[in-house]
Image: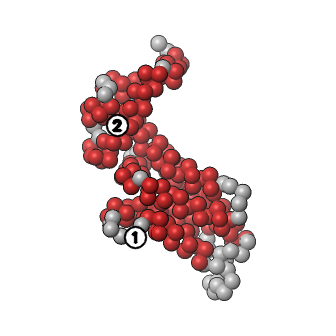
């Protein structure tokens, strides 16, 4: 069976589709319970009700399965933010969409380890999969565009550097996700998200002393 036929079979087989999805769900569950390093092939297939060969068949390797499970989750968390940032509304309203990234964790706090594991996996020395970095870079670039528009409209002070501020906001959002796990009794994620987005808008141009 050539690669094209195999790919078509994977895409069209109902049973195959179910098995592939089961492996992804099982991998995320294993990462929640044991961390990325502890999500072994045997644990994954046992939870998915599949055999070890299914991992190779659908994903090529266990590492590729973990990458897809983690980064698929990361993309799903960032997609609402991307849509909001790329909308045609006023720049201040678009910027507030960054709250959505953190608000999503409020809805499903158990998924925070998945998100953090995806980031750590991409940041590891020698990591060959750049999908996590690409997603974060795309988010930073979109934020930078919105912040630059805010400067042009006089909404924020001229001392604000769009690229640096965008990276700071992304880093703060990641930190909030971690903080929610370290201090579960602290302020709600939605409150922290509101504070995060409001910080930039608080640096308003009127009355600001530009350095």
Q: From the image, which quarter does the C terminus lie in?
A: bottom right
Q: Nearer the viewer, residue 165 or 198?
A: 198
Residue on which disc 2 sits: 26
Task: Locate residue 154 relative to residue 36 in the image: left or right.
Answer: right
- Nearer to us: label 1 or label 2: 1
Residue 37 versus residue 195 in the image, above or below: above
Q: Residue at x 40, y 70 (%)?
A: 187
Label 2, secondary structure: give it.
Answer: helix
Task: Locate residue 116 relative to residue 104 in the image: left or right.
Answer: left
Label 1, secondary structure: give it.
Answer: loop
Q: Upstream in the sequence, badge 1 or badge 2? A: 2
Q: How far across and how far down the image is residue 182, in percent?
A: 32, 64
Q: How far across and how far down the image is residue 53, in percent?
A: 33, 23
Q: Quadrant of residue 92?
A: bottom right
Real-space Cα distance between discs 1 and 2? 31 Å
Q: Residue at x 32, y 47 (%)?
A: 32
Per the rendering, the mark at residue 148 is none
Residue 11 in view here: yes
Q: How many marks?
A: 2
Q: Nearer the viewer, residue 199 or 126?
A: 199
């Amino acid at each position: 069976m050539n690669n094209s036929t195999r790919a078509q079979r994977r895409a069209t087989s109902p049973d195959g589709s179910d098995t592939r999805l089961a492996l992804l769900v099982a991998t995320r569950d294993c990462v929640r319970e044991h961390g990325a390093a502890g999500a072994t092939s045997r644990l994954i297939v046992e939870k998915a009700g599949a055999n070890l060969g299914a991992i190779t068949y659908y994903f090529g390797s266990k590492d590729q399965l973990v990458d897809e499970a983690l980064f698929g989750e990361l993309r799903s968390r960032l997609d609402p933010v991307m849509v909001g940032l790329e909308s045609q509304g006023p720049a201040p309203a678009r910027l507030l969409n960054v709250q959505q990234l953190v608000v999503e964790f409020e809805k499903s706090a158990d998924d925070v380890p998945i998100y953090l594991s995806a980031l750590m996996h991409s940041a590891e020395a020698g990591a060959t999969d750049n999908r996590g970095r690409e997603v974060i870079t795309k988010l930073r670039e979109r934020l930078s565009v919105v912040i630059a528009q805010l400067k042009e409209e006089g909404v924020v002070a001229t001392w604000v550097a769009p690229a640096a501020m965008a990276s700071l906001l992304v880093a703060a959002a990641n930190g909030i996700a971690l903080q929610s796990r370290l201090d579960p009794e602290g302020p709600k994620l939605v409150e922290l998200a509101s504070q995060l987005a409001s910080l930039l808008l608080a640096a308003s141009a009127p009355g600001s002393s530009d350095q």
